[in-house]
Amino acid sequence: MSQGIFEGLKVIDCASFIAAPSSATALSDFGADVIKIEPPGAGDPVRNLPNLPGYPISNHNYAWMLEGRNKKSLALDLSKPEGQAVLRKLAAEADVFITNFPPPVRKKLGVTWKDLAPLNDRLIYASFTGYGETGAEADKPGFDSNAWWARSGLMDLVRETNDTVPARSMPGMGDHPCAMSLFAGIVTALYQREKTGKGTQVMSNLMVNGIWSNGIYAQAALCGAKFQERPPRDHALNAVTCHYKCADGRWIILSLLNEDRQWPTFVKVIGREDLASDPRFETKPIRHKNAAALIAILDEVFAGKPLAEWRKILDGNGLIFGVVGIPTDIPDDQQMRETEAVVPFQDSDLRTINTPIFIEGAKKVQPRMAPNVGQHSDEVLGAAGFTAAEIAKMRAAGIVAG
């Protein structure tokens, strides 16, 4: 029975934290055999993320469950030459090598593209950095909070007014989209290898993904556009693409883009047909001119019923809107379950978040729980040709653990 499109594809995840390792997770979802290289002891720092102040409190290591699923963990001390030699042996037999180590670290460990390419002419070397491979900031470490969210202008732009402090990002908010970019690069390189028989280097970074995510405004800046301050919610330019608070404190956002057609239905179902004949709101241009007054009226309307009632009313009449979701909605979200956005683990009664790519007729593997540090060290080394005696010697020297 097939185990996925990438069954038999050997991937080395020699990366840390979120963006680059998540691209390996996406490959594993489609059946790739992923070996996760971790330092002995604490392992990948993402394992400690839920222990940091302010993070949700849980009995489960939810961050590692998501990022580490399906992978085999090899605890390998890369600070030692013997550990580096093991990694190079694995790379010589791999299809894909993924890393986000800073360039100086790669040089020190001997795992740059130039180091590994001569060992394996079919290797796809996937490099992920904070700010790109060249330029003054090439060696500068980056996180999605600064290189993706802040540098791109998104952090500044999403705040309500210029007087509001810049908005904080959520953990992995930029990392996970970036992972899909790196995944796409890897798959493109694999397609090229099918045609040429040769591997290559794939590159992506947080900064370029951030500016791509903010592409419309970034392109405006490149065109010399004059930027205007975004008005606060209660003075938005269009009342029917605004967000409103319901009686139970939950929020919805209206998206009535076909306003001329939808306006009569909208005022009817919310019980305010009088607005249709109100001279302040009779036509679309006039409604936009008087948007602040209409927002004030709709604030009172939506405050009269809880979210569940508004969902039935708006959905039942074909009016487009969105729920401003909160994380605790997700476990009971029927649409997420039915579309397999959320899927069960095969070896646990818990569920996890699916990667957002689906291919007709291609089943993904059912997720397996993330491994303990070094859980598969002996298995991985044995498959690479190391004898039991050699593995025992490496363990005694502290090169391998688990």
Image: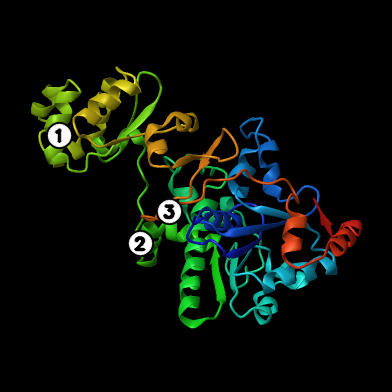
- The disc at residue 357 is 3
Q: Residues within 10 Å of mark 2 (few under 14, many from 20)?
A: few
Q: Quadrant of residue 231?
A: top left
Task: Kindly tell me whether residue 76 is visible in this rendering.
Answer: yes
Amino acid type at mark 1:
Trp
Q: Which label lies toward us, 2 or 1?
A: 1
Residue 157 spot, x, y in % from top left:
43, 48
Real-space Cα distance between discs 3 and 1? 36 Å
User: Which label lies toward us, 3 or 1?
Assistant: 3
- The reply to whether the C-beta atoms of the residues labelled 2 and 1 are less than 8 Å apart is no
Q: Residue at x 49, y 48 (%)?
A: 155
Q: Is residue 52 above or below residue 85?
A: above
Viewed as shown, does residue 1 lie left or right of 115?
A: left
Circle 1 sits on which residue?
Answer: 263
The local crowd at label 3, few if under 14, some if 14 to 19, many if 20 or more residues have their Cα within 10 Å, is few
First-in-chain label (3 vs 2): 2
- The amino acid marked with disc number 2 is Ala
